[in-house]
């Protein structure tokens, strides 16, 4: 498994404030992903990255932006948090050239927007 | 569009019973991958198995087994002689190309002592 950490692990914030979540990996995996988990929806892809400075949108990208300035870090930013963004956020990574395409997940960040 | 359906929202069984979690998928791709992940009460997502679309051979790992049938677009997961530690939410997922996983809604499995 990739060594994946997420910070913070828990956060409470107020509507309208900016929030940045960090995903850090130590395995030099090329691909990184941000998902959100909500009851009844499983996990849904927000954004992903296929290399440094290379990112693209996922299924539920509205209200989120990402940045990847180095291989090991992938940041997810909520520019102006809303209550609908209360969720558990998971980061995942995948090794380029892994033909089995397995994604490994971080421990998750629980975000509450009041 | 690709879709994964886990029709069983919650399952509750008594310890030592066998239990099967259903997963049905939809895809137009001829090459795809299927996965099962476990999410125990602690919240992390644990990878259990992957299968590619060209390999329909069933797999057994200890008390866990997986049945992949392309004819019915199903990838079911069976736990034999269930234990309390198997209590978790289980997710089935489908790989869409090389970029993302499409998840089912999850099945919450409770094993009662």
Image (cartoon, grey):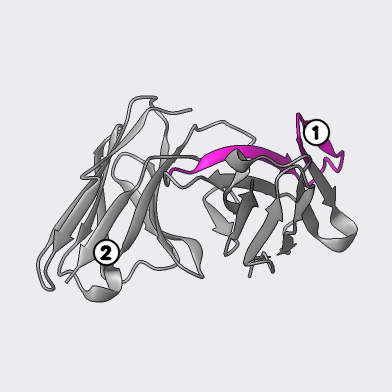
Q: Is residue B59 magenta?
A: yes
CA neighbours of label 1 inside 10 A, class few (<14), some (14 to 19), many (20+)? few
Span shown in magenta: B44-65
Image mark for residue A64: 2
Q: Chain of mark 2?
A: A
Determine which quarter of the picture holds residue B104: bottom right
In percent of width and height, residue A86 lies at: 28, 67
Q: Is residue B82 magenta?
A: no
Mark 1 to mark 2 CA distance (whole Å): 40 Å
Left or right: where A102 falls relative to A48: right
Depth check, front residue: B80 or A111 = B80
Q: Is residue A83 above or below residue A6?
A: below
Image mark for residue B68: none
Q: Chain of mark 1?
A: B
Image mark for residue B60: 1
In the rendered image, the quadrant that contains the C terminus of chain A is bottom left
């Amino acid at each position: 498994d990739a060594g994946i950490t997420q910070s913070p692990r828990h956060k409470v914030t107020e509507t309208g404030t900016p929030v940045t979540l960090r995903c850090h990996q130590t395995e030099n995996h090329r691909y990184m992903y941000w998902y959100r988990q909500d009851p009844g929806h499983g996990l849904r892809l927000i954004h992903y990255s296929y290399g440094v400075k290379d990112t693209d949108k996922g299924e539920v990208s509205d209200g989120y932006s990402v940045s990847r300035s180095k291989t090991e870090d992938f940041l997810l930013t909520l520019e102006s948090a809303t209550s609908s963004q209360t969720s558990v956020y998971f980061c995942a990574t995948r090794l380029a050239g892994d033909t089995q395409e397995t994604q490994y997940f971080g421990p998750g960040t629980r975000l509450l927007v009041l | 569009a690709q879709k994964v359906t886990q029709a069983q929202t919650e399952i509750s069984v008594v310890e030592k019973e066998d239990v099967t979690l259903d997963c049905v998928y939809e895809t137009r791709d001829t090459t795809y991958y299927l996965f099962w992940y476990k999410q125990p009460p602690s919240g992390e997502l644990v990878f259990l198995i992957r299968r590619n679309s060209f390999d329909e051979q069933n797999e057994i790992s200890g008390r866990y087994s997986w049945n992949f049938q392309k004819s019915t677009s199903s990838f079911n997961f069976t736990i034999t002689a269930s234990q309390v530690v198997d209590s978790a939410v289980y997710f089935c997922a489908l790989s869409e190309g090389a970029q993302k996983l499409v998840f089912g809604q999850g099945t919450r499995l409770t094993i009662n002592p």
